[in-house]
Amino acid sequence: MKRLIICLLGILGSLGYVEAENIEISTPHTSLLLSYETGGALKWVYYGNKLSETDIRSMKSGQWDAYPVYGLNTPSETALSVRHADGNMTLQLEVCEVESSSQDDAELFKVLLKDKVYPLHVTLYYKAYHDVDMIETWAEYSHQEKGEVLLNQFASAYLPIRRGDVWLSSLYGSWANEARLVQEPLLPGMKIVKNKDGVRNSHTAHAEVMFSLDGQPRENEGRVIGAALCYSGNYKLRIDTDESEYHHFFAGINEENSTYRLKADEVFRTPELALTYSEEGLSGCSRNFHRWARTHKLANGDQLRKILLNSWEGVYFKIDEEKMEQMMADIASMGGELFVMDDGWFGDKYPRNTDRSSLGDWMVNEKKLPSGINHLIDEAKGKGIKFGIWIEPEMANLKSELYEMHPDWVLKAKGRDVVTGRGGTQVVLDLANPEVQDFVFGVVDTLMTRYPEIDYIKWDANMSILNHGSGYLGAEEQSRMYIDYHRGLENVCQRIRRKYPKLTIQACASGGGRVNYGLLPYFDEFWVSDNTDALQRIYMQWGTSYFFPAIAMASHISASPNHQTFRTVPLKYRIDVAMSGRLGMEIQPQDMTESEKELYRKAIAEYKEIRPVVQQGDIYRLVSPYDKLGVASLMYVSPKKDEAVFYWWKMEHFHNQHLPRVKMAGLEPETYYRIHELNRIDKQPLDCEGQVFSGAYLMSNGLELPYNHLVDRTEKNEYASRVLRLEKVD
Ligand code: GLA
C-alpha cells in the first residue's frame, strides 16, 4: 500500500514550501487527474485519453473542486450539502490523506478529506479497472459531532466537462416504450434526468448518459464520456451549464423527500458512478460498458445464456399442468434449453387467477398444478431442458394470506388509507424492516430448498412506492424510506447470491423498469420491455444497447398480431430482431403451424452457432433507426475479430426505395471474411452468399442487400431483414 500522509505537511504548506501533488487514476487508455495541496481542497484537473508523464508534469492544478460542497462561496451547484448538529450549514473540506492499493481487478484510490472545523469526514473513492476503461467513484461520510448531521444533498460524484459543442445522449420512455434515445446539445441552464418511482427506476428515464464532446453524436467516431449511476432507487443526474467554461455534471441518489439524519460514527456510502471515455464514438463507450458489465458487474457475465420459452404471452394467468407440459415439450422439440413458468402458478386460499390477489402467497396452487413443481421439473428434465419460475417477492396484494398475517409489513403512511397499485390491490412490502428482508430472502430460499433444480427465476416488481410511510422506521427516520428500501433490497440480493451464485435470475419490473447497474451485480439479465413488438423493439434495444450488453437483454419472439401494438410482423423479421439479444420465446407454440415451427427450429439452431459472438462480442452500431434512413443496422464482432454477426432491418417500406448501403465496422481490414446468411427464406441466395470479402472492403463499402425478400407472391409483405454471419477465412 502506498500511503501519503500529508496533514503534517500542511504546516510546511502554510510556510509556502509545498507544491501541488497529482493523483493519477488510470485505466488502459484513459486518465483521470486530480491534484491537491496539503491542507487544501481536492481539485479536478483532467479526464480523457491517457496522459503521458510529460503531459501530467506540465498540467496546472484545476480550477474546479473535485467534490464541491455547500456553504462558502458556493452560488453554484454542489455535490454535498449538510446541516451540522449545531445548525451550521457550511462545509469546507481539506485533503488529509491519500491512499492507493492494488486489488485483483483494479487500483483503488482513497482520498480522505476532513472539514477544517467540524469532525466530519468525507472519503472519496476512485476504482480504476486494470483491464477495461472504467473508473468507478463514490463517497463515504461520517462524523463525530454531538448530535445528528442532516444530509440534504449527497451526490456520488461530480465531473466538469469543458464547453464546446457538447451533446447529451440519454434514455427516456414509459412502460412498453422503454429506453427511447434522445440526443440534444447542452444549452445554458439546468438539465435534469431523474426518477422518483421508489421501486423501478428505468421506465421513464435512465441513470446512464453519454456526452459527445465533438458536436453531434456519432456512433463510431468522436470523443465520448459515458456515465452510469449504479443504483436501483430514486436518482438525480444534474447537468448545470452556467456562466463558466464548463458544464457541471452531478450524479447521485435523488435527495428529494430523502433527507438523511447521519448519526455520529455511522458511515453513509453513496452508490458508485461508473465513468468511461472513448475516442471511438458512442459505440466505443458502449463496448467499454459491455466489457465491464460482462467481466465485473453482471452476475455470471462469462456464461452463455440459455434459449428459453416463457409462458406469459402464451397462456397469461391460465396456467395448468397440461399446458405447462405441452409448452415444455414444444420448446424442447424446437431445440430450446429452458422453460419459464410465469405468473399464475401460486396462491392457495386465494388462487392467482388475475392481478388482483395472491402476491405474497408463494405456495403452489394445487388445483392448477396437482402434481406440483417437482413433477414439472421432472418433465423438463425428461425432455432435456431446465425449469424456471416467476416470482414478485417484494410485493403483496391486500387479498392475500400474507397481508392478513402481516398488515404491518407493507409501506403505508400512518393514519391514512393505503394507496394501491396494479389490480387495485397491490402493495409494496417494507424492505426497511429486517423481518421483511428475511421473508423476501425466504421466498427464494424456500423455493430453492424445496426444488433445488430450479435453474432460473424471473424476479418481477410491478408497482411504484405510492405511500410514503414505513411502519418499521421511527418518526425521525421516515425520510430514509426510499434509501432504506434499496438497502434492504440489496441486502436480500446479496444473501441470495451468497447462497445461490449460479442460479440465473432475471430482473423484470413491468418490463424494463429495473435496467440499472445497481441491481445487475445480482441479476444475470433483464426483461427489456413488456412490449415484444419486433419493430418497436429495434428502437428499445438500440437505446438499451448504449449501456447494457446483449447477453443481459432478454429478447423474445412473440405472436403476431403483437399483443401490445397489434402489429402484424412476419416471423422472419420477429426472429431476426430477437436474435440480436438473449434469444427467447414468449408465445403458445400450440398455435404455430408446422412451417413456423420449422423456422423456429432453424433459428434456434443458428442462434446457438452465433451465440458466443452476440453474447460475448463487441457491438458496433451502424445505422440508427432514429436517423430514419429506412434501415437500421448493427453488428457484433468477436474479441478476436475472427467472427461477426451483422443485422439489417428495414424500418419502412416503399416501392423502388433507395436504402443506404451499410458500411460495416470493427473488422480487421486485412482479414478476409466469408459471408453466410442466417434464417434465409428467399428462394435464391443473396449475391454475397458464400463469397469472401476483405474487412477493408466491408468497412468502406458494405454489401448490397435487396430491399425485398424473394418469396412466393402469397408470402410477400412489407418487411425485410437480414442476419449475416461473417467468418474469417485462413
Ligand atoms: C409483468 C411482467 C410480465 C409478466 C407479468 C405477469 O408485467 O413484466 O412479463 O411477468 O408481470 O403478471
Image: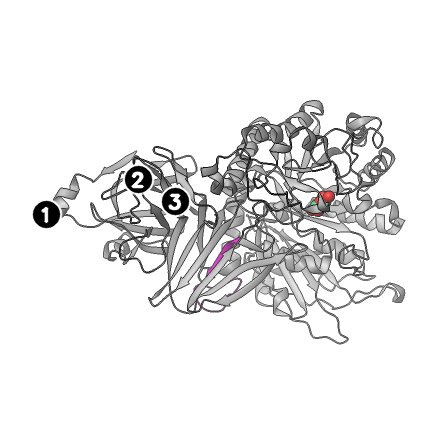
Element type at mark 3: strand
Looking at the picture, does residue 708 appear above or below residue 519? below
Please state which of the two labelled residues, at mark 3 or mark 1, is closer to the viewer.
3
Q: What residue is shown with label 3?
A: 151
Q: Is residue 526 magenta?
A: no
Task: Say if disc 2 is inside 8 Å of ligand 1.
Answer: no
Q: Is residue 146 above or below residue 499?
A: below
The residue stretch that appears in magenta: 207-220
Mark 1: amino acid: Leu
In the displayed structure, does residue 366 sit left or right of residue 436?
right
Which quadrant of the structure image shows residue 653? bottom right
Mark 2–mark 1 Cα distance, whole angstroms, equals 25 Å
Q: Quadrant of residue 260?
A: top left
Task: Look at the image and tell me in which quarter the N terminus lies.
Answer: top left
Residue 135 lies left or right of residue 661; in this view the side is left
Query: In terms of depth relative to the viewer, which is nearer, 499 or 135?
Result: 499
